[in-house]
Amino acid sequence: MKLLRSFFWAAIAFAAAVCLGGIAIFRGERINSAWLVVAAGCAYATGYRFYGKFIATRVLALDDQRATPAERLRNGQDFEPTNKWILFGHHFAAIAGPGPLVGPVLAAQFGYLPGTLWIVIGAVLGGAVQDLIILFASMRRDGKSLGQMAREEIGKAGGFAATVTVLLITIIMLAVMALVVVNALRGSPWGTFTIAATMPIAVFMGLYLRYWRPAKVLECSAIGFALLVAAILGGRAVAQSASLAPWFTLSALALAGAVIVYGFLASALPVWLLLAPRDYLSTFVKLGVVLMLAAGIALVRPQLQLPAFTRFVDGTGPIFAGKIFPFCFITIACGAVSGFHSLIASGTTPKMIAKEGHALPLGYGAMLAESFVAMMALIAACTLQPGVYFAVNSPAGLVGATPQAAAAAISSWGFPVSAAGMADLARDVGEKTLFARTGGAPSLALGMAHIFAGGTPFGAGGRLAIGFWYHFAIMFEALFILTIIDAGTRVGRFMLQDLLGHAWKPLGRTSWMPGVTAASAAMVMAWGYFLIQGVRDPLGGINSLWPLFGIANQLLAAIALCLATTILVKMHGLKFVWITCAPLGWLVTVTFTAAWQKIFSPAPAIGFLAQAAHLEASLRAGAAGSPAAAVEALIFNARLDAAVCGILLLLVAVILVDSLRLWIGILRGVREPRLRESPFVVSRLHMEEL
């Protein structure tokens, strides 16, 4: 039996190596998406079975006989032992925000190969390692947050810097996520109606479970799903109605205002009324659509239309400027390595783990599952014709404001596309136009719709089918993103109240409504400012804000890996530090290089300061092409982006220096390697209780 297992895992590892090698070597011919699926699946299985298990047993020494915080501090509210698979669903839904859907789609401008290799290798050796060790660390420290653990294990300076950095990164993240929603719904009455309808559906579900039919979860779920399908079908009728369509055909600025108001309400209203039912509804849809997409790809096995490398590896890409290194590795964050995950791994999940051994599937396994979602998103984008992909994702300010001008510019790059063909495609999916729908969500929805309608049992009915599946995909992505916006605004409000509570204690009380309202308003104003900045950007906002988000997110991962390395140094000295130092060194190199280029690059398409100088020169010469007030706002915003990027670099540098001083002191024997773990308590929890 042992010999058979050895042969089985040898075959899995061999399949991963052959498929990854084949993907890397094939040139000048179409490649089937099955190669990517098999390569990713086999690599994840091998990484989980051997590398993940090695870290869990040999390095962290997970012990099921040790009581977890969920058992020791059980209070039925925050601390509650939870079934492993139920908790897996919660953790996966929390970490799998829009990042694994949007980042790979944007990075596809380089071709399919860079993103594929980074998603697979980054997840196995970096992202899953970070998630597992941070989850372990929080679990051993009564479920403490990343900032609290950094303050205790690294030092006060590093801990304070970590707290401020997390708050700044949360603001940028929420702004970028909101911008993706705005760009996806702009000028789309079908999509806007469908998403708007989810708000009263969520409130109905909240009232239904709280007052009308308590504990009838399955019943409420069935009603909620039926209402969602009705909202999608109703959106088509609204879009075709001469009287109703104008009410839901909103400009980008109007949509931004609506999203800001929603963020405030989700943060300030009782959690059971809007946030909890919406999150439940989105999780329900999220898991279902991910499984459907996996089934669709397995059945259709579409050919990849984008090449392994495009001409834009030289850094002149229309979606965002910059070369593969470093920008591919910050564009794809969630799905490979994501600092945001460390907030979840030190948030609710460690307070709900029943046994320490569950940390392996929750920390390492859930990250691999999210990485597989990123791979499927990359496949969906790469199955589009290259001309269509670039027509949807290239901003009008770069390729031209008219369909004819945009089609001519994109065709001149070597990716043929016609204005008439794009008009037919827009008509098929029920949109007025698909040109310049930047942000990644519309092109991903197109890819998903073609997979669903092209060969799955779900796709019948021609134009009606592809229109339905396109808007179903848009709703799916928007639900993903709005889940992050409402939960993220609330978490940001908690962090802000915690900081303000040091100045005036009532502001720190999460039960004091004036403090809740003020902190919620401050959070939405902060990320709302960056959202409006992106909406007014003639290049669509994603060009500048997504790299800033990627830098911020990966800097947060660097902070988490600093903490993880500190814990390993205290536990084992130098013996196992390579596990976290390798991804930490790579992320520091990538993010500091990207941040330096975004601040100081002389190319206006890349550098914030160069962009500000270019706009200023155009304004003085009278060649700006926009009102002076709008150009001055763009100049200010570019300089503000540079300042934010610089502040984040300085804060992370403080944490790195503080960590290095501690590591050197421990290894030289002048600092005590004292771990702040909770005392060992024997577990008395039986799995039958869960």
Image (tube, grey):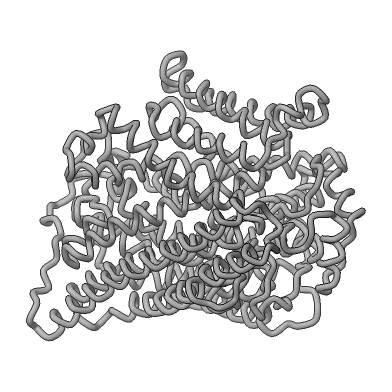
> Closest to the observer: 370 or 606?
606
> Closest to the observer: 39 or 430?
430
Q: Please, is residue 238 above or below residue 690 in the view?
A: above
Image position, residue 357 (x, y; %): 31, 58
Residue at position x 58%, y 61% in the image:
103
Q: Is residue 337 visible?
A: yes
Query: Going by the picture, which residue comes out furthest to the top?
Result: 212
Residue at position x 74%, y 54% in the image:
436
Image quadrant in which you'd find residue 21: bottom right
Q: Please, is residue 193 above or below residue 408 in the view?
A: above
Residue at position x 68%, y 62% in the image:
622
Count of marks placed on residues: 0
Image position, residue 623 (x, y; %): 70, 63
Residue at position x 50%, y 58% in the image:
636
Image quadrant in which you'd find residue 135: bottom left
Q: Please, is residue 50 above or below residue 509 in the view?
A: below
Left or right: residue 443 compared with residue 643: right
Image position, residue 583 (x, y; %): 40, 76
Quarter of the image with the C terminus is top left
> Closest to the observer: 210 or 254?
254
> Closest to the observer: 501 or 299?
501
Image quadrant in which you'd find residue 245: top right
Q: Is residue 39 visible?
A: no
Left or right: residue 538 compared with residue 492: right
Image position, residue 182 (x, y; %): 62, 44
Left or right: residue 111 compared with residue 562: right
